[in-house]
Amino acid sequence: MKDGLYRLRYQTATLNATGVVVLEAGQISGCDRYYFMVGSYHHDGSRITGKVGFSRHSSRHGLLSIIPKTFDLVFDGVASDNFGQFNVHCPALPLIRGSAKFTWLAELNAKDCEPSD
């Protein structure tokens, strides 16, 4: 995947969200409605693997009490220049597992950009 700004959509049995992430030189950071995310990734051909730490910044009504304020997700999957699709799981909480998709939005520091659908 190339460095840039991506839309993130992830889904587990307990969490569903859309957010924005930045990929840059093996580092990933971003946020969604409830969490900040910071981590790293490794891209090798069409494979991508990584680990992202989540920290809740806003309360969420109806959130299961087993979901802590901070946790790590490990991901692995396939990626092209503009798109990635991953399996995700939380080693500390096996109940948290699901999928995520990254969709290209823009280059970093882009002057003129049109959102993609």
Image: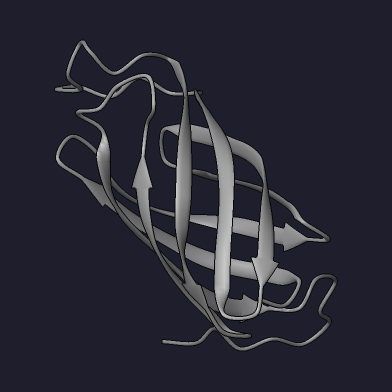
Residue 113 x/y as whole percent: 69, 86
Does residue 85 appear to the left or right of 44 in the view shown? Answer: left
Does residue 52 appear to the left or right of 2 in the view shown? Answer: left
Image point (25%, 51%), residue name:
11
Residue 32 x/y as whole percent: 46, 44
Image point (39%, 27%), residue name:
91
Give the number of callouts: 0
Q: In the image shown, does 19 or 42 lie closer to the viewer?
A: 42
Image point (22%, 13%), residue name:
66
Residue 45 x/y as whole percent: 65, 80
Q: Quadrant of the N terminus?
A: bottom right
Above-or-below relation of 63 to 25: above
Image point (43%, 23%), residue name:
58
Does residue 115 appear to the left or right of 38 in the view shown? Answer: left
Q: In the image shown, does 73 or 60 lie closer to the viewer?
A: 73
Q: In the image shown, does 113 or 69 lie closer to the viewer?
A: 69
